[in-house]
Amino acid sequence: MSQVVTFGEIMMRLSAQSHLRLIQASQFDVTYAGAEANVAVSLANFGIDVAFVTKLPKNDLGLAVLRILRQYGVDTSYICFGEGRLGLYFLETGFSQRPSKVIYDRANSVFALSNPDDFDWDKILENAKWFHFTGITPALSDNLVESCRNALKKSKEKGIMTSCDLNYRAKLWSEEKARQVMSELVEYVDVLFANEEDAEKVFGIKADDSNIIEGKLSLKGYEQVCTRLQEKFGFKKVAISLRESIVANVNRWSGVLMDGKDFYSSKQYTVHIVDRVGAGDSFAAGLIFGFLNNMKPQESLEFAVAASCLKHTIAGDFNQVSIDEVKKLAKGEGSGRVVR
């Protein structure tokens, strides 16, 4: 049985080529992606026994997803199938002052229309140590709110650690609905992941002396955010990735972690971006890896930030890096010199 279980939707990603706009594109690069699947692939690359749970269409696209996940060593034993469609999303990669853009075509996907009884959590979570989901999954349907609740309750019964990445998506639900649903679900969550604006969008908790639009972030402000989240919901750990956007393809990247009453901040990287989608998922995966391997809090945070820094340099949502590559960057080997 898998050590880590992640639960969510995986979609076909259609990317415009060579920084073309979607309105210019005559062909697309095809990959497969989804927040919880991205976490699963990252963990599998780090040697963690991980299962991804979803529902796929009973057609060749569903089989293609299975083959991709198995290629990376992800356990697909608990994926179920049904009639319906695979969700899609279209990506336009930004450059300089032009931001990246995502268009979803995932309404009424086979996963969004899944029923809670599609997932036997008692069996799925047998002998698992960690369960992970994101705020994207309950945003897709009320049935999936119930499925997430069932998984979390069963995890608590079994003494399994639980984590959630808030991953607020304005195109999927309102701030009001997100606050209502996530306030209930996170009562069962031990470890919370977020980006620099999720806590404000979902819970109304804003960092002082920070301006997301201008790319000015205050570490003291995010220490206060972590503290307020812990006090409100009782999380054991809170981690936030921090992105300071200079232009679309050049960002500063770092993270913070509140572990109990102790607050940690990472080194900051200036990243020239190939593909930023999935960076937050690789941050979460890096921390889960660190926690499962009993790394010290600062070491776990530095590992996660280095892993997600490298993700920005890799096309596609999946973070295809090794433990050794991450550790070398975390130790300062980031010059980009040719390895011979």
Image: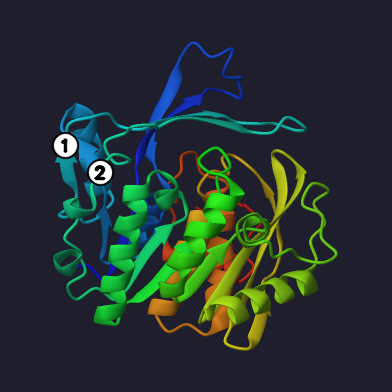
198 versus 287 height, above or below: above
Instruction: State the image coordinates of residue 12 (x, y, percent, origin top left).
Output: 36, 32
- Near-viewer residue (114 or 28): 114
- Name the disc covering residue 196, or none: none
Closer to us: mark 1 or mark 2? Answer: 2
Q: Amino acid at mark 2?
A: Ser
Q: Quadrant of the N terminus?
A: bottom left
Answer with the quarter of the image where residue 18 lies.
top right
Which residue bears the numbered disc 1? 82
Whether residue 329 sits left or right of residue 127 in the image: it is right
Residue 78 against residue 306 in the figure, above or below? above
Q: Which mark is residue 114?
A: 2
Q: Is residue 39 above or below residue 192?
A: above
- What residue is at 85 percent from the left and 64 percent from the top? 209
Q: Is residue 48 visible?
A: no
Figure disc tally: 2
The image's colour scheme reads rainbow
- Relative to 15, 43 lies left or right: left
What is the secondary structure assignment of the residue under circle 2? loop
Percent x, y for residue 320?
42, 51
Hey, what amino acid is under mark 1?
Answer: Gly
Q: Residue at x 62, y 52 (%)?
A: 336
